[in-house]
Image (cartoon, rainbow, N blue to C red):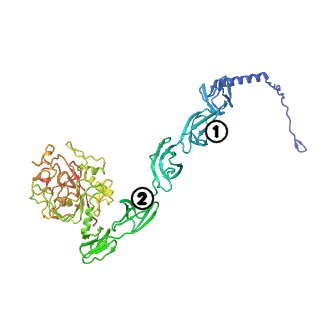
């Protein structure tokens, strides 16, 4: 129940147990004995650590009695050595007469170390004197000034250079003690002149050296610097005397006596026209205008003025000593006659750029000098040249004008060498019927009659391309040998070349000469050609045949290189398989000897009627054409088929001794090089 509505709580007693009390904590007190012991222990440990890890280092100066200090770091001095731990230390040092040392040393990990301390000597004071005074002094190439001079000089070897006008330069090399000590150096320079005595009559003349007054008069002696000099002696009223001498320093020399001559007269000569030659008493003096020619006074002087195409002007004059005179001379023209005979007659005529109408007798009178003549007519190539008209004479000049076609051929004939100096022959071909009759002994099936309309002038190599020529293109080319016989001489025809290599050589020659290459090349392989190009190429089969077989004035073509009959009528008409080659060739021409076992040097045999060598014999030759067998009596293109597998070879070689290959109609084919196949070059003479 609650009293007044408040609920009462009943309290129950429980067992009480008092808590255990904890005794008070005691404060620990460290005594000073313990502290001291700990410090001593740490010190001993540190000392042991330092001693065990430190290195014994000796600082060794290069100067006795030097004072050296280590300025930082932990160190222990043990007399001559220090105990130092590895690392860097700053060291300072002093020594009398030396620069102070302040540097960083590095202690390594070796247990015993010696570190050098280098002291540098202080400069020395050098007193420098010379004779003559004011000589210029340089020290080790650097200018110091003029002696006498005192200068601090670094210790060690030193070189002083002394120089002065009119004296020979000289040097002193010595060792500077340094350490602020004083030294003296003196040098007497040697004179750089010679004493030259010039005895003159009369005496008292001024001596000039290289055109300048030397300050001396004759006889001297004059002090003249060593070397080559122009020496002149000048005295009023007398002619200047001049000589060239070489003076050696220190020499004393007396020149040969000099006789001074009274001053000469002077003559100046002007002519109209100028540039005339002048002689006085037969001695050439120069050309007009000619100023101040010195002449002997009081003497008759024969003066002649000469100019080509003018009459000689002659006169005699005499001058007093020192007299000057001027001569003005108008020269009179000389004339000559020229008779001009021209073919055709009705031409335009020019002399020195001016048109001249010839009289009926075609004789003209002209100033007797060289004149520039020109003759012109429409439809003809003009003529121009120099004609020297001779005084008082009549000369006849005959001139035939060439038609434009004739002039073109003449021009083309002048361009008959390649850039490498190979000779070419200009050919004007006509249509040719190639091949051979079936009845011709030795004929092969690939030689049918076929016609080519050759209508373009072309150049053909006078000789086959030589090893020397080809090695300008491929320096390492080797034509090798045949059965031990050399094929590699410079002037032998190049062999062992493929058709492709021969064509590439033609392109090389074109590019070197500034011509458009004939062959189109991809990589290093010929893949086509430019028919309009006038660059170098291999001759076409038709061109080769025309050059080898055509005879002017004969309808029938040549059968063999020597004519129509077999065997050759005489020795040495070409290089074929002969008696000289019988030990290397199976079949030879009996009773024939050309004295060559293998290929001969080009041009060893006489040329054919067109001036071309070795079209038959020596080596066979690559031509431009693809190989095929055309139809009988067909018309073929000059450059042959447009495609094919092989290329044509023409001509016989030193290996051929039978009728078939010796005939000029013989054809062979291939692409690879061999020991008996070479080539020659060709190109069109002009664009179409």
Examine the image and state in which quarter residue 308 appears.
bottom left
In the figure, is residue 493 to the left or right of 371? left
151 to 57, vertically: above or below: below
Q: Position of residue 612 (x, y in %)?
A: 20, 57
Mark 2 secondary-structure assignment:
loop
Q: Quadrant of residue 294?
A: bottom left
Q: Quadrant of the C terminus?
A: bottom left
- Name which residue lies at 29% across and 49% down: 471
Residue occupied by mark 1: 150
User: Of residues 284 and 142, which is closer to you in this image?
Assistant: 284
Query: From the viewer's perspective, is residue 315 above or below residue 179?
Result: below
Spot occupied by residue 322 in the image (x, y as percentages of width and height): 47, 60
x 32%, y 75%: residue: 355
Q: Please indicate whether residue 321 sits to the left or right of residue 571 in the image.
A: right
Closest to the observer: 301 or 682?
301
Q: Is residue 602 above or below residue 80?
A: below
In the rendering, which numbered label is found on residue 382? Answer: none
Residue at coordinates 54% horizontally, 44% vertically from top-left? 166
Q: Is residue 384 visible?
A: no
Residue neighbourhood size for the residue with mark 2, other residues' Cα within 10 Å, grouped as few (<14), some (14–19), many (≥20): some
Label 1 sits on a secondary structure element that is strand
Q: Give the side of residue 117 with respect to residue 503, left or right.
A: right
Are the residues tagged 2 and 1 within 8 Å (C-beta)? no
Identify the disc placed on residue 296.
Answer: 2
**Above or below: residue 31 compared with residue 169:** above
> Whole-Å distance between the Cαs marked 2 and 1?
63 Å
Residue 60 rendering spot, x and y as whole percentages: 62, 27
């Amino acid at each position: 129940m609650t009293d007044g509505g408040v609920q009462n709580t009943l309290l129950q007693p429980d067992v009480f147990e008092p808590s255990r009390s904890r005794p008070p904590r005691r404060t620990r007190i460290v005594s000073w004995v313990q502290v001291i012991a700990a410090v001593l222990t740490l010190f001993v440990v540190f000392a042991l650590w330092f001693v065990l890890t430190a290195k014994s280092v000796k600082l060794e100066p290069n100067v006795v009695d030097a004072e050296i200090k280590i300025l930082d770091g932990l160190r222990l001095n043990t007399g001559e050595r220090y105990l130092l731990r590895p690392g860097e230390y700053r060291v300072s040092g002093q020594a009398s007469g030396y620069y102070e040392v302040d540097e960083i040393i590095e202690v390594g990990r070796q247990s015993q170390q010696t570190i050098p301390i280098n002291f540098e000597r202080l400069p020395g004071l050098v007193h420098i004197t010379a004779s003559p005074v004011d000589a210029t002094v340089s020290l080790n190439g650097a200018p110091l000034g003029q002696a006498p001079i005192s200068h601090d000089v670094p210790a060690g070897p030193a070189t002083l250079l002394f120089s002065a006008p009119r004296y020979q330069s000289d040097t002193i090399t010595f060792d500077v003690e340094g350490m602020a000590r004083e030294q003296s150096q003196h040098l007497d320079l040697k004179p750089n002149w010679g004493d030259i005595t010039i005895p003159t009559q009369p005496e008292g003349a001024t001596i000039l050296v290289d055109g300048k007054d030397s300050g001396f008069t004759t006889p001297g002696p004059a002090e003249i610097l060593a070397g080559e000099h122009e020496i002149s002696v000048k005295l009023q009223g007398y002619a200047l005397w001049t000589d060239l001498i070489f003076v050696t320093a220190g020499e004393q020399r007396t020149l040969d006596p000099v006789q001074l001559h009274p001053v000469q007269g002077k003559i100046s000569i002007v002519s109209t026209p100028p540039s005339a030659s002048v002689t006085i008493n037969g001695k050439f003096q120069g050309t007009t205008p000619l100023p101040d020619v010195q002449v002997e006074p009081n003497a008759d002087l024969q003066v002649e003025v000469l100019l080509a195409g003018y009459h000689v002007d002659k006169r005699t004059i005499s001058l007093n000593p020192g007299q000057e005179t001027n001569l003005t001379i108008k020269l009179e023209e000389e004339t000559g006659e020229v008779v001009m005979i021209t073919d055709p007659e009705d031409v335009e005529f020019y002399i020195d750029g001016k048109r001249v109408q010839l009289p009926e007798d075609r004789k003209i009178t002209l100033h007797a000098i060289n004149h520039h003549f020109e003759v012109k007519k429409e439809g003809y190539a003009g003529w121009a040249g120099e004609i020297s008209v001779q005084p008082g004479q009549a000369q006849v000049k005959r001139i035939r004008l060439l038609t434009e076609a004739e002039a073109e051929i003449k021009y083309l004939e002048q361009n008959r060498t390649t850039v490498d100096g190979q000779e070419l022959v200009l050919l004007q071909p006509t249509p040719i019927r190639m091949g051979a009759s079936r009845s011709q002994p030795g004929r092969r099936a690939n030689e049918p009659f076929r016609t080519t309309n050759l209508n373009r002038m072309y150049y053909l190599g006078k000789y086959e391309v030589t090893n020397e020529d080809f090695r300008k293109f491929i320096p390492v080319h080797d034509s090798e040998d045949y059965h031990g016989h050399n094929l590699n001489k410079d002037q032998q025809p190049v062999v062992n070349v493929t058709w492709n290599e021969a064509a590439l050589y033609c392109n090389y020659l074109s590019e070197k000469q500034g011509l458009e290459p004939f062959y189109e090349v991809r990589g290093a392989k010929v893949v086509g050609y430019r028919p309009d190009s006038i660059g170098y190429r291999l001759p076409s089969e038709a061109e080769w045949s025309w050059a080898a077989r055509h005879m002017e004035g004969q309808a029938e073509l040549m059968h063999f290189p020597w004519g129509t009959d077999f065997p050759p009528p005489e020795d040495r008409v070409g290089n074929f398989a002969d008696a000289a080659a019988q030990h290397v060739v199976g079949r030879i021409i009996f009773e024939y000897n050309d004295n060559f076992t293998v290929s001969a040097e080009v041009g060893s045999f006489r040329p054919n009627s067109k001036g071309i060598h070795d079209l038959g014999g020596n080596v066979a030759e690559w031509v431009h054409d693809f190989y095929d067998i055309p139809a009988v009596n067909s018309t073929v293109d000059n450059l042959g088929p447009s495609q094919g597998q092989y290329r044509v070879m023409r001509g016989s070689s030193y290996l051929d001794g039978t009728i078939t290959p010796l005939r000029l109609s013989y054809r062979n084919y291939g692409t690879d090089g061999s020991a008996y196949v070479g080539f020659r070059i060709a190109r069109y003479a002009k664009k179409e």
